[in-house]
Amino acid sequence: MIRYLARRFWQSLLVLFGISIIIFIILHLTGDPAVLLMPPDATKEDIDNFRKIMGFNDPLFFRWPPWQYLNPPWRFVTDTQYGHFFTGVLRGNFGMSFRHQQPALGLVLERMPATLELTLAAMAIAVCVAIPVGILSAVRRNSVIDHAGMVLALLGQSMPVYWLGIMFILLFAVRLNLLPAFGAEGWQHLILPAVTLGAFSMARIARLTRSGMLEVLGQEFVRTARAKGVSEIRVVLKHGLKNAAIPIITVIGLDLGTLLGGAVITETIFAWPGVGRLAVQAISYRDYPVVQAAVFTLASIFIIINFLVDILYAYVDPRVAYK
Amino acid sequence: MSDGRAMALEAGRAVGRREARQDLRRVLRELFRNRAALIGLLILLTVAASAIFAPAIVPQDPIAQEITLRLKPPGWSGPGSRTYLLGTDHLGRDILSRIIFGARISLIIGLSAVAVAGTLGTLIGLVAGYRGGRVDDLCMRVTDTMLAMPFILLALAVIAVLGPSLRNIIFVLGITSWVSYARIVRAEVLTLRTREFVAAAKALGGGGGRIVFRHLLPNVLTPVIVIATLEVARMIILESALSFLGLGVQPPTPTWGGMLADGRAYLSTAWWLATFPGLSIMLTVLGINLLGDWLRDVLDPRLQF
């Protein structure tokens, strides 16, 4: 068990390293970040100066030839653009936001609670609706509940998140005037964005629960339990759900990450003051330190969630740890 | 080659052809028995036909602006005019015509991005699964990294840097979504690798390339086709999301996501602007999902996602 977790931990660190490389490369995709970052009417001198200040003239990954940069011995990799970026990331320093003149990571972390609140609320709603619907659909197979539930789930999986959000605004905020469409004060503001964000996962988890339960409930040990006279509720929840849980847990873990990323769109529609909206604005202002900090932070949270899911996984199904 | 061997080969090929024909007939029979899949297919054929014949069937020019006719409600409601069946937008353009042309962008990007991602992912999966060891480890860490990325943000950032052209959007969507193919193909190859026919091919002196492309590739194509079908739906949704956030194919080219974004500002006065493009996306995606779910059940019921 410990060895399994240690290996997963080490793999997570490697993934974070990979992410730091990708967000570093994005800025250098065009070949000249100075032109990208400076306003279009900047003079050539301005751009040259900016390039010098930002260190864009340094080599990207390696100093060549390495043997001339061995003081300290690792200087040929650390005294490069990526080296400086990476050592910055290790210290939590993604540079200053060009737009806000504040440390980029601070800005991101300031908005993180709002995003986490939205994501967790969305997942909670999704799970609370989807699992009962999935179980009911499986137990009352081919009933009206089953058909209605699964048609809704299919529609939910086919709808673009932001369109659903817009339709919610149209219906509940514009027409019925029941719920607020924008802002983030109080629980009323959370409902529309959370349901919007959670809809896709809700549909997926409902379908998965149904198919998992159908499979488990058809097995021998369930018939044995029934034959022993175990109550139907106990059979469904204890024998059925517990054994159908593994794929459901995996999907919940994966979807939590997807929701964190998907919050980008939901936050933009509902003007929710989270990391996603900050990042979208930063992209349109070419405020790359903030974009990099946002991507890195969201990815880190995704990795932490998955690490926790792995632990849970090994607990539910001990065979996993020995593979 | 001796005559006998040539005849045997020819006979074998004929049997193969007959089997392929029977398979096709079986699949078609299944399709007609499954109502949901048939509905999906019909939706998709309609969308594809609209996209292909768009210039011939649109009632109006999708780009021509007629400012005096702006925000006309759909034709069936009282004050609407029959000329604009689904109404007009804030610049007086016919929404139905724009939706028909929008199908082109959605399908082109959906299919091309899946082609890019599918090819890349299948290759990576084949190599990782067949070579194993260090290569496999590296590939798996790269897939983990891609999975951890907040996808939309990554795509937005890259397109913001490269510029929002059709080619760049296809490139970005393709390069960021090969992971699901790679994982499935690798898993398949890991089990196939130990099978007799691979050992036989090796014993006959088949090189790595030959084994991977002649013996492994045909055996992993089924799950790849299933995933690719369902991924077209995801790509269409992602493309429309990019357009919605302003980083898709640029105006005046009509895109469903772009139309939705325009419609957002007129939610309280002109509901039809945002409603119809969204419905088109949903119907198309629904069609693909219905067909894809059925394909999975028929071809490869073990797949779960």
Image: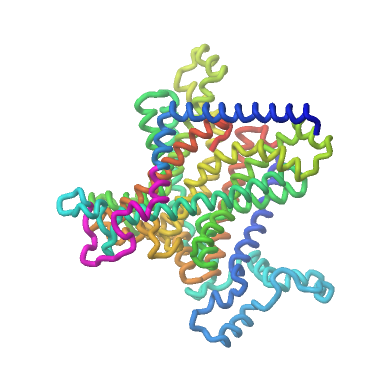
Q: Nearer the viewer, residue A322 or B123?
A: B123
Q: Is residue B193 left or right of residue A123?
A: right
Is B82 situated above or below B41? below
Residue B252 in picture, x, y percent from top left: 38, 65
Which quadrant is the N terminus of chain A positioned in? top right
Residue B264 in picture, x, y percent from top left: 32, 59
Is A143 situated above or below A90? above
Q: Is residue B99 left or right of residue B209?
A: left
Magenta-colored span: B46-74
Q: Residue at x 31, y 64 (%)?
A: B64
The question of residue B59 being in magenta is answered with yes
Instruction: Give the farthest residue toward the front.
Output: B3
Q: Nearer the viewer, residue A185 or B106?
A: B106
Residue B126 visible in the displayed image: yes
Which quadrant is the C terminus of chain A positioned in? top right
Q: Residue at x 39, y 51 (%)?
A: B53
Residue A221 in picture, x, y percent from top left: 57, 18
Q: Residue at x 48, y 68 (%)?
A: A282
Instruction: Give the farthest residue toward the left.
Output: B78
Q: Nearer the viewer, residue B121 or A226?
A: B121
Residue B15 in picture, x, y percent from top left: 65, 26
Q: Is residue A156 left or right of residue A309?
A: left
Is B182 situated above or below A88? above
Q: Is residue B255 left or right of residue B193?
A: left
Residue A199 visible in the displayed image: no
